[in-house]
Structures are given as structure tokens and as C-alpha cells.
Image (cartoon, coloured by chain):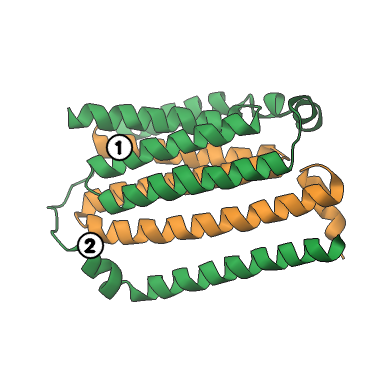
Chain colours: A orange, B green
Amino acid sequence: MNMEFAFLLAGVLLILAGCFCLIRTYHLLKIIIGMELSMKAVTLLFVIAGRINGNMELSQAFIITIIVIEVVITLVASGVALDLYKKYGNLDVRNLRNLRG
Amino acid sequence: MENIIIYVSLAALLVCGVLAVMLRSIIKDAICLAAASAALAIIMYTLGAPWAALFEVSVCAGLITVIFISGISLSHDTKAEVRREYDDKRRMGVLPVVLVVAGIVMIGAGAAIHFEMPVAQRLVQDFREVFWNSRQADIWGQIIVMLTGGTAISVLIKEEKKKS
């Protein structure tokens, strides 16, 4: 197994773990963690893409963009989680169904 | 030596990542996610992406962990409550089996089709030139995303003040 294949394998397995977490849990903070994990896997795949095509500088520019977006998403999602907690006293996403108009 | 560091970091990334979604305590989840970020930063630095590694360590392993831990401390679900309400141990227990099966399938498929990726010659460019000149649209996009995030947070906080 060469290094690129090992990276690809790890990236796909991490995306799978993140998506599994998104599907299986109801805890909002854990859902954010699952999403973060999938984004880390995408970052890893960008690194290996930069290594394969030899243009690591372009990959770094993309990775920095991904990280900025990741932070903003986490921040807003944590704010929503806190709002949910203040309203319902727990972080169960099933409570979000009550927001339907 | 470099290969050993990369493979050990990759294994650490995978283990910490899986633990981050499998452990029952959310604090431990956040710490495992930070460790996964640190392992990813080591991989980035070793493969020749030092700026991305710097951002990964300072922002993902630092700032995001602080955000998570603040969120957790402000919404203090006890461990027993998490166990009772969400039953994550049972729900997430299948994950290692799914990952092992997926890994075996991928390794088998890779061996069957003789999966090999060509690695191109390293293109020597200046990162600053690529980031500030070639990818200017990305920078504007980042600024817009940051402003949107700031606005969203200020709206959430304003709503909270109105309630109290």
C-alpha cells in the first residue's frame, strides 16, 4: 500500500465516521463534532491532492479557506445550540422540529 | 523517518477522529477532535504545507476547541443525562464494524484494480503570490463568510437580550 492510498483510505473512513455520527446521534454538539470530522477529512484529501499534482501552495490556499469556513460554521452552530439549550433545557435536535411553522 | 512520522500521525488522526464521535462525554469528544487536528497539522507540515499547518493548529486545535468547551460549559448536560437521553453508546457501537468493513472493501478494491497514483514533480511557487494574487476571489469569499458569521452571532445575542 503506497502512501497516497493510505491517505485516501483514511480520508474516506473519516468522512464515513463523520456522516455516521450525523445520522445516528441527536445531540447537537456531537453533530457539530461529526461535521468537523468530515471537514478534517476533506482537508486531509486536499493535502494529498496537493502532493499528487505537485502544487501544494494552491492546496494550502484552499485549506485556509476551508478552515475559515469551518470556524464560522462552528461558531454559528454553537450559538444555535446554546439558544436551543436556553429554550428547551437540552441539546436534542428533535426539539428543532417544534420550530416548524 | 519522515514516512514513519506521517504514518504514525495518520494513525493518530484516524483513532482520535473515531474516538471523537464514539466517546460518550462531550468534553472528551472535543479534546479528541483537537488531538486529531494536531495530528493533521503534523501531516501537513511534514508534506510541505507549513502555512496550512499553522492555521490548523492555531484555529482548529485551539479556537474551535475553546468554542466547543465554552458551549459545553454553558449547556451543562450531565453524563447521566446524556446517557439516558441520547443512548449514544448503543447507537454509535456499530461504527467500528462499519469502518473495518469499509476499510477491508477499499483495500480489496485497491488491490484488485492495482490502484496507484502518479505523483507529479513539485511545482515551486510562492504561497503568498498564490494566496493573495491568484485566489483573490477566495479572500473576498472568506471576508463575506466572516461578516455573515459575525452578523448571525450578533443576532443570536440580541435575541437573547430581548428575552431576558
Foreground mark, 2 or 1, reads 2
| Residue under the point 51% across and 55% down | A70
| Residue B112: % across, % down | 31, 32
| Residue B11: % across, % down | 37, 28
Mark 2 is surrounded, within 10 Å at the Cα level, by few (under 14), some (14 to 19) or many (20 or more) other residues, namely some
**Quadrant housing residue B43:** top left
Identify residue type, mark 1: Phe
Q: Are marks 2 and 1 in contact (CB under 8 Å)?
A: no
| Residue A64: % across, % down | 38, 58
- Tell whether A20 sits left or right of A2: right
> What residue did someone put label 2 on?
B127
Compared to residue A14, the image places residue B67 above or below, namely below
| Residue under the point 27% across and 61% down | A58
| Residue under the point 79% across and 47% down | A85
Whether residue B74 is visible here, answered yes or no, is yes
Compared to residue A100, the image places residue B9 above or below, namely above
| Residue B107: % across, % down | 36, 30
In three-dimensional space, the C-alpha distance between marks 2 and 1, rounded to whole angstroms, equals 26 Å
Whether residue B115 is visible here, answered yes or no, is no
Q: Which residue is nearer to you in this view: B1 or A1?
A: B1
| Residue under the point 57% across and 57% down | A73
Quadrant holding the C terminus of chain A: bottom right
Label drawn at residue A5:
1
Q: Chain of mark 1?
A: A
Identify residue type, mark 2: Phe
Secondary structure of the residue carrying tag 1 is: helix
Mark 1 is surrounded, within 10 Å at the Cα level, by few (under 14), some (14 to 19) or many (20 or more) other residues, namely some
- Tell whether B65 sits left or right of B137: right
Q: Chain of mark 2?
A: B
